[in-house]
Image (cartoon, helix red, strand yellow):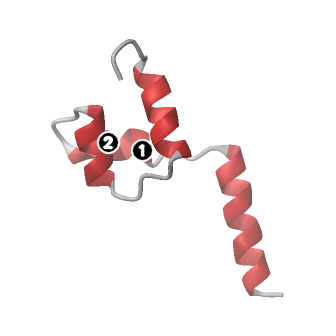
């Protein structure tokens, strides 16, 4: 992770779908889970659209 920006590391964590916020907290080096949750739970348009499609599929 040396030589990488915080944004690059966060992006990779999201791409790898790290499931545990606690694991993400440790990887990112945050001292409080609240900091991680503010960053880690940040959604993007692609993931939001995917979630909407999955919910719609449940009702079809």
Q: How packed is label 2: few (under 14 Cα within 10 Å), some, or many (20 or more)? A: many
Task: Decide: is 35 above or below 33.
Answer: above
Image quadrant containing the N terminus: top left
Residue 29 image offset from top left, x and y in percent: 22, 32
Q: Quadrant of residue 35?
A: top left
Task: Decide: is 17 above or below 11.
Answer: below
Instruction: Kindly indicate whether the residue at mark 2 contacts the one at mark 1 (C-beta within 8 angstroms).
Output: yes
Residue linked to disc 2: 36
> Tag 2, which secondary structure?
helix
Which residue reaches farthest right?
60
In this rendered view, identify the residue nearer to me: 57 or 2: 2
Query: Is 55 placed left or right of 60 in the picture?
Result: left
Q: Residue at x 33, y 16 (%)?
A: 2
Residue 48 image offset from top left, x and y in percent: 67, 55
Query: Is 50 placed left or right of 38 in the picture?
Result: right
Residue linked to disc 1: 40
Q: How packed is label 1: few (under 14 Cα within 10 Å), some, or many (20 or more)? A: many
Task: Decide: is 56 above or below 15.
Answer: below
Q: Residue at x 70, y 45 (%)?
A: 45
Residue 14 image offset from top left, x and y in percent: 50, 44
Image quadrant containing the C terminus: bottom right
Spatial CA distance of label 1 from label 2 is 5 Å
In this rendered view, identify the residue nearer to me: 60 or 26: 26
Q: Residue at x 50, y 52 (%)?
A: 17
Task: Decide: is 48 above or below 56.
Answer: above
Q: Residue at x 55, y 44 (%)?
A: 15
Residue 59 image offset from top left, x and y in percent: 77, 87
Q: Which mark is residue 10?
A: none
> Tag 1, which secondary structure?
helix
Query: Is 26 placed left or right of 1 in the picture?
Result: left
Which residue reaches farthest top?
3
Which residue reaches farthest left?
31
């Amino acid at each position: 992770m040396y030589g990488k920006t915080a944004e690059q590391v966060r992006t990779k964590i999201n791409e790898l779908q790290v499931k545990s916020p606690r694991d993400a907290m440790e990887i990112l080096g945050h001292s409080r889970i609240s900091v991680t949750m503010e960053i880690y739970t940040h959604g993007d348009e692609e993931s939001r659209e995917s979630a909407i499609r999955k919910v719609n599929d449940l009702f079809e």
